[in-house]
Structures are given as C-alpha cells and as structure tokens.
Amino acid sequence: MLIDPMETQLPADPVKAIERPQVVTQSLLYLDGVSVSFDGFRAINNLSLIIAPGEMRAIIGPNGAGKTTMMDIITGKTKPDAGDVIFDGQVDLTQLDETAIANLGIGRKFQKPTVFEMHTVEDNIEMAVKADRTVFGTLFSRHSAEIWRRVDELLGIVRLGDHRKRLAGDLSHGQKQWLEIGMLLAQDPKLLLVDEPAAGMTDVETGATAELLKDIARTHSVVVVEHDMGFIRELGVKVTCLHEGSVLAEGSLDQVSADERVIEVYLGR
Amino acid sequence: MMLTRFLFERIDRGGWVFLVLLGLAAVLVPVLNLAVPPGSMFHVSNTAVGLWGKYMTYALLAIAVDLVWGYCGILSLGHGAFFALGGYAMGMYLMLQIGPRGVYAHPTLPDFMVFLNWTELPVAWWGFSSFPYAMLMVALVPGLLAFVFGWFAFRSRVTGVYLSIITQALTYALMLAFFRNDMGFGGNNGLTDFKDILGFNIQSQTTRAVLFSLSVLALMAGYLVARAIVTSKAGKIIIAIRDAEPRTRFLGYRVENFKLFVWTVSAVMAGIAGALYVPQVGIINPSEFSPANSIEAIVWVAVGGRGTLVGAALGAGLVNFAKSWFTGAFPQGWLFALGGLFIFVTLFLPKGILGTFTDWWKRRGESRKPPTASPASQPAE
Ligand SMILES: Nc1ncnc2c1ncn2[C@@H]1O[C@H](COP(=O)(O)OP(=O)(O)OP(=O)(O)O)[C@@H](O)[C@H]1O
Ligand SMILES: [Mg+2]
C-alpha cells in the first residue's frame, strides 16, 4: 500500500546538462560566491573554495568565522542565499536535501559529537555502513555477514572493539568522536567533512586521530576543521583560513601562519 | 514461512509471556463464560467479558500509540481519530445489517436517514453492506488519512509540539464534522441499535465471547507486527530518528519515509482496534473523536512504559480498570485522577511501570553476578 517516494522526490534534475568550465568539472567540490545571512548577519560572505579529488584540506579560523556554516551549506542543512556549490564537477548541491547529499557520497562529522546514544556502539556503525537505505529494504533486511564483517573492521580501526556492546551514550567524549569517525568511514563517502575531530581529546588521542585522518586521506577527499595548530601541522596539508565568512588566506601552514592578517585575527601575537 | 519468521524470530522472554497469557485468555475466557455455570467460582461473568473485551481494543490502540510515540518520538494527540474512523466503518456495516428492522422499517435506509427525509443511501455508505468491503475500509480509511496527513506533515518537517497540536486539531475537526447531521453519519447520536454481525445476533453471549477472543487475537497480531518492526533494522533507524533526527538524515536515510511508514501502520492498527470496539460497546458516536480520548491513550502508554509495547498494553488495561472503579466511586473525580496519575508517572516513573520493573530486574540480576563479570567497561586510554 505504501509507495516508496524515495526516488521521486528529488527536485528538478540537479545534474543539469549545462556546460561547465573545466575548473568546475575537474574539482570534487567547487564553491563560488557563496553567501548566507541569518537575520541580516552575513555568516558566509562571497566564499569561494575548491577541493580537488583526493585532496585533504585543513580549515582554520576564529570562532564564528563560518567554518561550521560552510559545512551546513555543503551538506544541505542550510541553503545559501547566493552562489554555486557544485560536487563532483556537475551536481548542484543547493538543489538537494541532506539525505540526497549524503547518498551522493558526502559524509559529515559534527562539531559536537552526535551519535545515537540509545543504540550500542556496534549498531551505530551498522546503521552507517553503506547498504540499502529504504524503508522496506531495512525492514526485511536479514543479518548480513558482509555488513557485520565491515562493522568489525571499522570497530578495529576506531579502536572501539572492546566497547561494541556499550550504549553510545555511555562513551567518553573522545570515544564518541571516534565512533562518529567510524560511522563516517562506514558510509564510505567520496568526501569527508570533519568538524573539530580533536576537540576534547588528550594529546595521545589527538595524535592518533591525526594518524587516522592521514590514513583515510589516502583513499578519500577530506576537509578538516580544527583549532589545534599542532594537529594541523601533523596533517601537513594545504590550509585555508576563514574569517567573517570568506577566505582570508590559503596555502601551506607556514605561509598562512606568517600572514599578517591571519596573525591579526586568529593566531594573535 | 517468511512471514512467520519475520514476526516471531525476535520475540523476547517478556513478549512470550505476554503472548502466552493472551492466548490463554482468548481460549479460557469464552469457555469459562459460556460453559461454566454462573454459580461456579470459575465462571466469568458477561459483564467481565464485555469489559475486558473493550480493554483489549484499548490495549491495541495503546500499542499503536507506543509504536509512533515510544519508538519514533511522534507524540500523537489524535490517535483517537483513527480508532473512531475504524469504529465508524464497522458501525456503518452494522447499521446496514439492521435492514427493515429499524423503527421506521425502511428496507434499506438506517433510521436516522429516514428521519432526515433522505431517500437514498449517500455515496459514502455504498458497499458497506458487504462485510469484506467494510473490513477493507476499517483499515483503508484511517490508513489513507494517516498517509495523506503524514505525507504533508513529515515532508514539511513538522515535528514536536507543532505536530502534536495539529494531530489534536485533526481529531477535533473530525469530531465537529461528525457531529453534523448532513455529514451523513448519524450526527451526535452516532450509529447504534445494531442487530447482528455476519448473521449472528450481536447481543448473544456467544457472539460477545467470540468478539472478545477476536479482540485478543487482534492485540496479539498487533503486538507481533509492532515488535517485528521495532526490532528490525528499520526499527533501529526509527529509534535513531526519535533520538537524533537530523543525524539520521546525514547518514542518508529518508526520515520522512520511515515516519510515514510507522505512522500509517499505527493508524491502521488503531482503526482495527476501533472496529472491534464498536460491536462490543454497541455504539459509535462523534465523542469518540474527542481530544480527551486521544490524550487518555497517551497516559496509558506513559503509565505502562513508553517504548515497551507490552507495557503500553498493560497500561491501557490498568488505567481503564482504575477508571471503571473510580467512576463508580467518585464519578466527578476521574479527570483529576487521570491528570494526577500522568504527573506522578512523569515525575517518578518516567519509564512507566514496565520500564521501571525491567530496570529493577536487570539491576537485581547484575548485583547477583560476581563482580569480576563486567568486561568492556574500562576506557581504552
Ligand atoms: N542557524 C543559525 N542562525 C543564526 N546564526 C547562525 C546560525 N548558524 C550559524 N550562525 C552564526 O554564524 C556565525 C558562524 O558560525 P559558525 O558556527 O559557522 O562558526 P565556526 O567558524 O564554526 O565557529 P567555531 O570555531 O566556534 O565552531 C556565528 O556568528 C553564528 O552565531
Ligand atoms: Mg564550528
């Protein structure tokens, strides 16, 4: 009796057959002239950013610079007032909702770790593992050895194997961060948006997180937001500094941290 | 085969106890009512059969409410509407069975239509003299209404209090509509004076005992379906939606489809409950749509234990048992008692009776185990 409106709901074809310049078609993520205001306050102001396929990029910037809001725009949580957001050289993300964008292959870890607290650690991962996501597919899905092998593997990667039967809500802050990274990996996205993965972690955990991200970046494109400069240095990738909703500086960490304006607004002297 | 496995493979111990007890009741109550003479201490009175049969339909409604509220976080203050619509569909069938035996002795039209000087059956009533058609409508009308309502509400992401308020408005609007004579459903008198069902006299004690058993079977079926849903992988997603809806979207699940699914299943369940309720109480009128009824169903679930299914059914039984006692002793006091009960449960038993009991039982089990048997609780730092 129920029809599954899953496929029918996408707004007018986001993959328009329009000719796009090469700079767009060759980038994994292309933001151009993006702006968004909340009650007159411009949180993102004419922002442009390009992520190449396979690239890992670190984003820094003071509180309120718009880093999280940028991720909200990419993942469909916030609709921009103006500008282009193009994924994979052709898909206009501004026309899609969160679910469609997630299924295109963009995964996200939130600044405040968000896991399903009433589910066990392993169930959190299981729900994230790439598989049929329709109502009836999940309703009648049977125990799949393949999926659970993947769950085991991921639990190993994020070192939560010993905690798999615990409720996610009972984990420490750092463990929740790792669980969320595990869920992100389980989705096997093309692009990972990771918002402050090291927040609330000990130095040892932070180091391990950096290692993990570098490992992930070998096979995925990653955008990481962090305030921890040691962590950014550890990653050793191109850095973009945001300020008041637009790009203030871009380059290697040394270049960016030598920039007068970056020192002024962010690093302090 | 597939279906049996789907329905039965994930029942837990409490669930089996519940099913076995219900199964026993479905068999024993009619026997003790019909075959044991009234003088015997084992005799079950006619009143008790009627009363508990009614509670079984309430329990099914409670399971329907728990499915959406306890598991998916949708606080419906309008589930009474689906219950009443199922009841009306059954009532319409029963009305047309009266035939020429009405007060006005009209060959086809129910009395209230003759009284309104109508000459033919309104379109909405066509087909209702057929039992299979009426049973189809019992499921289809609430299901379709829920589907359309849910389609718009969940797609526009109406949640929380706002959603609760519109569900309440829905049932209120239906109540006002059904009160009107020109709606063609009997106005404020509703549908009553039923004579028979499938040719059996609706007043006869045998029919009533059968209706009791059918209500118990429907409750068991409702439990099985709800349990199968909530323990499936879809059930995990549904609970995830309850706890962190936006996060579920970012994992790539279409939240609105999952909500629409449980919402519609739940409405159909409520409709079936209503259809079993009407022949047992002998009347359906617009007051069944009254917002207070829907709120009462929420209290049953809260008292029994949200998100436990069995608890919801238990809560429906207990609260209604208390209600029939209370309305006998202090007729004016019931609403205050109900409100007080809700506040008490919210403050002191947030997990309801069954949830609290289960916690206590687990803790008791754990404290009996030797302390060494708690692995996996050291943080891995
Ligand atoms: N939904 C919203 N409504 C109103 N204002 C918002 C909203 N989202 C973000 N803002 C504002 O936009 C600005 C940018 O916020 P954002 O969270 O993107 O900053 P950030 O760079 O992630 O900062 P932090 O380092 O503290 O996480 C802030 O001033 C914030 O208050
Ligand atoms: Mg932020």
Image (tube, coloured by chain):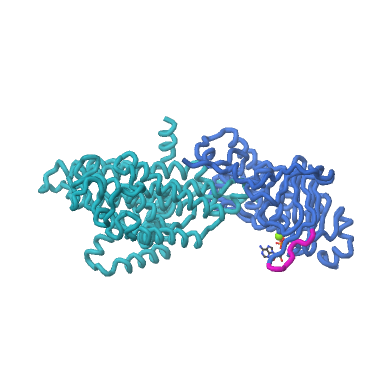
What is the residue that sits farthest to the top in this orientation? B1
SS assignment for the magenta stretch, majority:
strand
Return the x and y of residue A113 as percentages of the image width and height: 64, 55
Ligand 2's quadrant: bottom right
For residue B29, say whether it is visible: no
Q: Is residue A132 above or below residue B160?
A: above
Hey, which quadrant is residue A6 in on the image?
Answer: top right
Give the residue drawn at x 88%, y 56%.
Answer: A254
Q: Which residues are magenta?
A: A39-46
Hey, which quadrant is residue A164 in on the image?
Answer: top right
Q: Is residue B365 magenta?
A: no
Q: Is residue B115 left or right of residue A166?
A: left
| Chain identifier matching the cyan colour in the rendered picture | B
Return the x and y of residue B31 as percentages of the image width and height: 19, 41
Give the residue drawn at x 89%, y 60%.
Answer: A258
Hey, which quadrant is residue A34 in on the image?
Answer: bottom right
Return the x and y of residue B104 as percentages of the image width and height: 19, 52
Q: Is residue B47 left or right of residue B376?
A: left
* Quadrant containing the N terminus of chain B in the rendered view: top left
Q: Colour of chain A?
A: blue
Q: Is residue A199 left or right of residue B81?
A: right
What is the residue that sits farthest to the left in this orientation? B39
Return the x and y of residue A157 as percentages of the image width and height: 67, 42
